[in-house]
Amino acid sequence: METSQGPLVALSTASVVRRRVVLAGIAQSAAGVAAWGGSVGAVAAVQPASPSASVSTSGSAGVAPALKPPRSVALPSPTTVPAAGLLRLRTASQVGSPLKYGSSDPQRPGLCGEIVDALLRVDADLRLDGLEHQVPLRRVELMLGRHEIDVFFCLLDAEHRSPLMRYLPVPLYRIRHVLAMRADDPRNPRNWDELRAFARDEPLLVQQGTKLAASLREADVRHVESARTDRDAMEMLVRGRAAAVYGQDLGLRQAQRGTELERLVRLCPTVFQEEAQYAVVSRRVSAPVVARLTEGLRQLAASGELARLAERYR
């Protein structure tokens, strides 16, 4: 049996064969990090308001940015022996994010939950315990930093998270930063300069506890963090408590589905930033476990399963 800390049994002959297959996949993952912009599983290009993956304050338009690797990548060496046999890892799900977990829509029950299910299908000996526990995002970060959980799906790269966790090198799906506005409001900020001017008089509404506010601070855009969820934010928008919501396209669309918000709120076409969601592991998780998780996700990306799952939520 295997735990997050390391192997407890010797490799069998079958495991050695499996190791050779997995090592080839790890080498492919390493090559993907070296040329990150070509990572498998990336969605189709869009026209963002920034010519780079980081926030640009110039307001110029450009081609869709290549993904930059996370600040703290858990990339196993090609010589690492992947974990073999039964592997139990601790995890959790995120509360207040129907895009990721716990949606009431049976057609879209939660993208990260579906990614977990797909990973368990390609690795029949992997067990992920704790998905029934829904915790706030900040608590997820603390649990990873305190080694109370081993792995979590899915998180954006953020500077304050680097000391607490490492990112597996396979992008799971991309999200786009967009504006949500009332359907009868014809305004449409087209770049960062126009967005700053817009927010000068009417600060943007942002969901609490997300990375979105950091992007707006970096771009010097006025905003307030007073909405608990994407749906709360759009309901506040409809009631006139804000002129626009700054959010992630997939999360906003998921919150709209099956409600009056589909008719009352529109998503503006401008993409202000685009970045990827990743699986993350505690810094105490061993290299063989990292290698095994990376290989499972690489298989999902190479088969197109990650892209197919994400497209259903777009």
Image: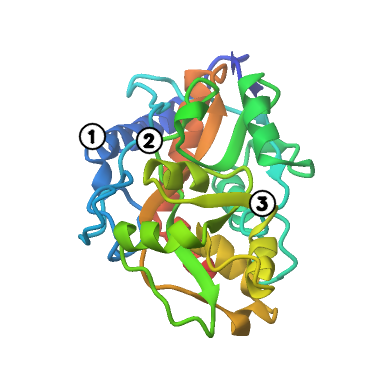
In the image, is residue 216 above or below residue 69? below
Q: Is residue 68 left or right of residue 83?
A: left
Give the spatial CA distance, label 3 vs label 1: 39 Å
Q: Quadrant of the N terminus?
A: top right
Checking the image for residue 21, the label placed there is 2
- Tag 1 secondary structure: helix
In the image, is residue 73 above or below residue 185? above
- Can residue 170 be seen by looking at this rendering? yes
- N-terminal of the two: label 1 or label 2? 2
Type of amino acid under label 1: Ala
Residue visible at 39% across and 49% down in the picture: 275
- Tag 2 secondary structure: helix
Circle 3: is it few (<14), some (14-19), or many (20+) Cα within 10 Å? some
Q: Position of residue 287 (x, y in %)?
A: 47, 20
On the image, which quarter does residue 31 sit in? top left
- Front of the two marks 2 and 3: 3
- Tag 3 secondary structure: strand
Checking the image for residue 34, the label placed there is 1
- Front of the two marks 1 and 2: 1
Residue visible at 33% across and 36% down in the picture: 69
Checking the image for residue 226, the label placed there is 3
Circle 1: is it few (<14), some (14-19), or many (20+) Cα within 10 Å? few
Type of amino acid under label 3: Ser
Give the spatial CA distance, label 1 vs label 2: 21 Å
Q: Do the CB atoms of the residues marked 1 and 2 lie less than 8 Å apart? A: no
Type of amino acid under label 2: Val
